[in-house]
Image (cartoon, coloured by chain):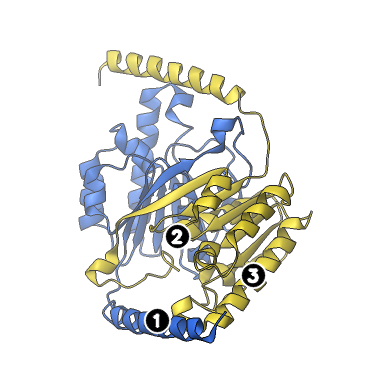
Chain colours: A blue, B yellow
Amino acid sequence: MSDEITVRHNEKMRKIKAARDKMMETKTEEKGLIVVHTGPGKGKSSAGFGMIMRCIAHEMPAAVVQFIKGNWDTGEKTFLRERFAKEVRFFVSGEGFTWETQDRERDIAAAQNGWKIAKEQILDPEIQFVLLDEINIALRYDYIDIDEVVDFLLTEKPAMTHVCLTGRNAKPELIEAADLVTEMTLLKHPFRDGVKAQKGVEF
Amino acid sequence: MSDEITVRHNEKMRKIKAARDKMMETKTEEKGLIVVHTGPGKGKSSAGFGMIMRCIAHEMPAAVVQFIKGNWDTGEKTFLRERFAKEVRFFVSGEGFTWETQDRERDIAAAQNGWKIAKEQILDPEIQFVLLDEINIALRYDYIDIDEVVDFLLTEKPAMTHVCLTGRNAKPELIEAADLVTEMTLLKHPFRDGVKAQKGVEF
């Protein structure tokens, strides 16, 4: 490659860095974030558990409440319960996907119980990060009242506590209330070609 | 709620479960997947590290190569190096974002070195999952040749090894070659309101 390209590139990067540094100086506020991972793509729960890994790394006590899936012996659950019982409190409220249980009354009771635990964990001053995994499914079926959840997050959540809510079909009220919303979109999935869910990747 | 709603719901769920079970029976193939996390949203790397957590849980030896960001003392790096040195091999090839280094020659050398390590790890029969974190940025700037990467993944990757490639602006050739592609889209970000990146959530 020519020296000219390198010189031009380095100059461009210098300008980008200067602009970025200036922008970063204005970002000074610290606050507990309401984070939402939604959309039909993969990675919503994985990204939530990636954040849990970061919390462990930073010695920030965390809690997980799994709302809908839950009776599977998922990798995350085993891992966290066996190796990080002190760092991460792990609760399972649901008993499987709703189409597994076929019992609406039981699903509602499980979701309500999960929300009760979630509130306790969010209010606990020791806990800095709470992952509400797949709560959006419980909200979508109105097993938990969306207005109650949004109201709680906006008025009762301690200022510095982060809460991450995952699951497809996040309600507009939740997106409106959130600070950071990511939509995971599926561009391609191996299911189409007869490949089953693979250990380590999908569970 | 009325009994009628519950009965109707349970019947609907029974049908969904039957259809799902039937569909799942056709999903029998096992294969090592090429997974891509791209798009401008958050969660691309977090979801990759969530998969690493799953691999540890399932006792699947894994490797991580961080391509572009790298000189930050990220939570993931500290955590994995200190606590899971046996389970996860962790390599850092880059020295920071390209606008931090302002040295194109050095960035190219770092990216090429990362790709060399990546190939070794993918070919290693002991390793079952390889995360190539932010490799898409190196590919985008042509620091690594996309054709070489795609060719390697399609012809030399061991059949059962999973490889997850992250970073925005994934090249079309990579998306074409991949089995599972998720695009993370940003619907909302607290940066807009002057909030800085928060520990545990973003790093």
Q: Is residue A37 left or right of residue A150?
A: right
Q: Callout 3: few (<14), some (14-19), or many (20+) C-alpha neighbours within 10 Å?
A: many
> Where is residue B109, by image quadrant?
bottom right
Q: Mark 1 points at which residue?
A: A12
Considering the image in quadrants, where does the N terminus of chain B appear?
A: top left
Residue lying at 28% horizontally and 63% vertically, measured from the top left? A158
The span from disc 3 to disc 1 (Cα, nearest Å) is: 24 Å
Q: Which of marks 3 and 1 is in front?
A: 1
| Circles 3 and 2 on the same chain | yes
| Label 3 with label 1: CB-CB less than 8 Å | no
Instruction: From the viewer's side, name the closer residue of B139 and A94.
Output: B139
| A50 relative position to A180: left or right | right
Instruction: List x then y, in percent, for residue A59.
Output: 50, 69
Mark 3: amino acid: Gly
Q: Which of marks 3 and 2 is nearer the N terminus?
A: 3
Horizontally, is B180 left or right of A152 in the view? Answer: right
Please state which of residues A142 and B33 is positioned toward the viewer in this rendering: B33
Instruction: Check the residue under mark 2 and report the chain it is in.
Output: B
| Residue B168 badge | 2
**Which amino acid type is shown beneath numbered disc 1?**
Lys
Mark 1 belongs to chain: A
Q: Residue A104 carries which label?
A: none
Circle 3 is placed at which residue position?
Answer: B114
A83 and B186: which one is in front? B186
Callout 1: SS: helix
Image quarter in which the C terminus of chain B is found: bottom left
Q: Are tags 3 and 1 found on a single chain? A: no
Residue type, mark 2 in image: Arg
